[in-house]
Image (cartoon, rainbow, N blue to C red):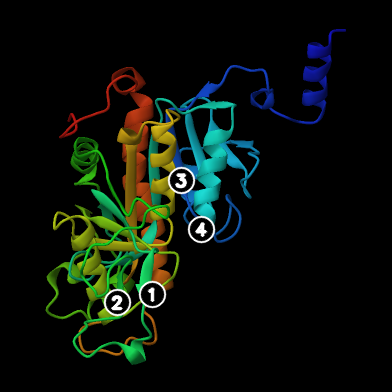
Amino acid sequence: MTMRFLGLVLALCLGLAPIARADAKPIPVKVVVLATFEIGEVTGDRPGEFQPWVEGLPLKESIEVPGLRHAARWSPETGVLGVMTDMRARARESVAALILDKRFDFSKTYWLVAGIAGADPKVASLGSAAWARYVVDADPIYEVDDREIPADWPYGLYALDTDRPNVKGSAKGSSGMVWALNPQLVDWAYGLTARTPIPDNTGLAALRAAYVGEPNALKPPFVLKGEALGATRFWHGEKRTQWAEDWVKLWTDGAGTFTMTDCEDQGILDVLDLYAKAGKVDFQRVLVLRTASNYSRPPLGAPAFPRAFHGEGAMAAFDSAYRVGSVVVRELAGHWDRYETNAPKGEAAK
């Protein structure tokens, strides 16, 4: 009995899938779906971010990846890999660990970050799904205690290497600060999904109703294009939303519109960008889809507390992330002969 055969027998006895063999040819992955958390189990109970993908695509096989707290889920039939990264700073570590796993070939992979977020009520409504054109980092920042802000400052947050708000500084060694996604791929994804029906209900309508005079906040859920702002801290309020609007415009040189606030995209995009420069992934194949579970501020004139995080909004956002994002995943994986070599551009084929 050869050592190789003995190793295979041992792997089968331990219940390990053949993909775990160290000497196997790397598995080409067509699409990676990155979600950040789950409420409970990944199947069979109340869904969070990840469960709709596991059950819906479906992703039936579990693969343990060193450096990931949760098993990845894999569909060998479609070539789609699903990963729960965990939240905030841990997402950065999880994506790096995944890319470094030599069992996978990510050279032609499309990456979809799909998760819930807080929406600027000027731009989007609860349950809405926004394809990001830019991701902006809000972590490398100077902060002055709000009780000590100079009288002529709008808020106490400002860029590194500056001395006041709304001046672009730098964050060398910390972050790229802003990442422009492939505009043709974003336009294609938006065109493919713009008419995707997103369910509305009386609970969502009731939560929207207080935003009188803000037409986008009052709309039933819809698909749009709009930027994602990443910060590892949760924040909420009118002044912070004004800062977020200004911060996104500052770092995108006026091209971007703050739409969604989340805790992971800046870390994920930074890692993907770094490994793209090393030839491990193709950054031109990255998409970010964020769906609104809550608003980033209360209605104008209303107190900031209690914060407007609602179960109804979260459940709607979980559903719309899968409902909209899966259209793109199925198209890419299902027509690999079309998209393996050339990324889609502009309007999607009807």
Which residue is the site of mark 4? 89
Q: Are marks 1 and 2 in contact (CB under 8 Å)?
A: yes
Which residue is the site of mark 1? 235
Q: Is residue 167 left or right of residue 135?
A: left
Residue count near mark 1 (Cα–Cα under 10 Å), binned few <14, some 14–19, many ≥20? some
Which residue is the site of mark 2? 240
Q: Earlier in the sequence, mark 1 or mark 4?
A: 4
The residue shown at (16%, 56%) is: 253
Instruction: Return the residue nearer the eye: 119 or 228.
Output: 228
- Position in image of residue 64 (x %, y %): 66, 39
The residue shown at (13%, 71%) is: 215
The residue shown at (46%, 38%) is: 57
Q: Earlier in the sequence, mark 3 or mark 4?
A: 3
Dividing the picture into quadrants, the one containing residue 219 is bottom left
- Position in image of residue 133 (x %, y %): 23, 48
Amino acid under disc 1: Trp
Which residue is the site of mark 3? 34
Amino acid under disc 4: Ala
